[in-house]
Image (spheres, rainbow, N blue to C red):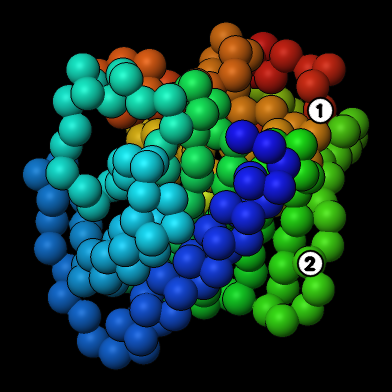
Amino acid sequence: MNHAELKALLEGSVKLAKEAGERIMTIYDRDFSVVKKDDNSPVTEADMAAHAVIDDGLEDMAPDYPLLSEESAAIPFEDRARWEYYWLVDPLDGTREFIKRNGEFTVNIALIHEHRAILGVVYAPALSLCYYGAQGLGAFKQDGDKPPVAIHVQSRHRDKVVVAGSRSHRGESLDRFLTNLGEHELLSMGSALKSCLVAEGAADIYPRLGPTSEWDTAAAQCIVEEAGGSLTDMQMQTLLYNTKESLLNPHFFVFGDNSVDWSQYL
């Protein structure tokens, strides 16, 4: 795929994420129902509505590429393993934030090629913030209708490290990491926006020491990498996609300063 083709897919994905976001907001602004999935995580009608918008849009834009979404049916690894390109989508990342109505939820759309995210869009409709990037095309942030601006990670961490942390998920592992890290500032944020804080240089690191799925990280990973940062597992190896039956991620770090072995603080 050449740059022109990838750029066209990126522009289409940004448009689609915003359309899905508009659909989410029509539900956000009224009463909505919440049900629990088999893993006890919440799902709302907004999740399903956004999934339908994205599913239809991607089918029109790139009918040859399969879609793997949090809200789609399970697809066996023996089928997925043959995919060279595919879309990896979380139509509403941060459902708990959506339910709390704090605005910190996103639409995540990624294109995967041979286990790596080569296109990513993270759109926060309640905040009118859109982060996006694609391989070789850079990373950008758009605030409302303002022109997009190029974003870059903080390539050398601050003396007082700024840590992005989850607003809904906190545990002993993170507390231990922060203690070992020493003096720091904690920025609490929901959904994939934590990774975007690293991508734009507002945070130095986001340690995720709890469960996530591949659709939670792929879009943001592309944005972070295009902004000069990394998303790695606890062994400091780049996170890859569609390599196994399970779609669960290992624990991971998102960071801008590649000179530091962040695993030393575990």
Residue sitting at 16 percent across and 75 percent down?
Answer: 33
Q: Height in image: 80 above or below 64?
A: above
Residue 199 seen: no
* Quadrant assignment, res 39: top left
The residue under label 2 is which amino acid type? Pro
**Dot 1 crowding, Cα within 10 Å, few <14, some 14–19, many 20+:** many
Three-letter residue code for mark 1: Asp
Q: Position of residue 146 (x, y in %)?
A: 78, 78
Residue 148 is tagged as 2
Residues under labels 2 and 1: Cα distance? 24 Å
**Which corner quadrant holds the C terminus?**
top right
Side (left or right) of 19 relative to 66:
right
Whether 160 is drawn above or below 89: the answer is: above
Answer with left or right where residue 188 lies relative to residue 77. right
Q: Position of residue 63 (x, y in %)?
A: 36, 49
Q: Residue at x 40, y 56 (%)?
A: 58
Q: Which residue is mark 1?
A: 257
Residue 265 in view, yes or no: yes
The answer to whether 187 appears left or right of 55 in the picture is: right
Q: Residue at x 55, y 69 (%)?
A: 15
On the rendered image, what quadrant is the N terminus found in? Answer: top right
Q: Position of residue 152 (x, y in %)?
A: 83, 45
Do residues under tags 2 and 1 come within 8 Å of each other at their CB atoms? no
**As drawn, which residue projects farthest toward the bottom?**
30
Mark 2 or 1: the one toward you: 2
Q: Nearer the viewer, residue 53 or 35?
A: 53
> For the image shown, how many numbered marks are present on the structure?
2
Q: Residues within 10 Å of mark 2 (few under 14, many from 20)?
A: some
Q: Secondary structure at mark 1?
A: loop
Left/right placement of residue 265 relative to residue 20 reads right
Residue 250, horizontal then vertical, whole percent: 42, 22
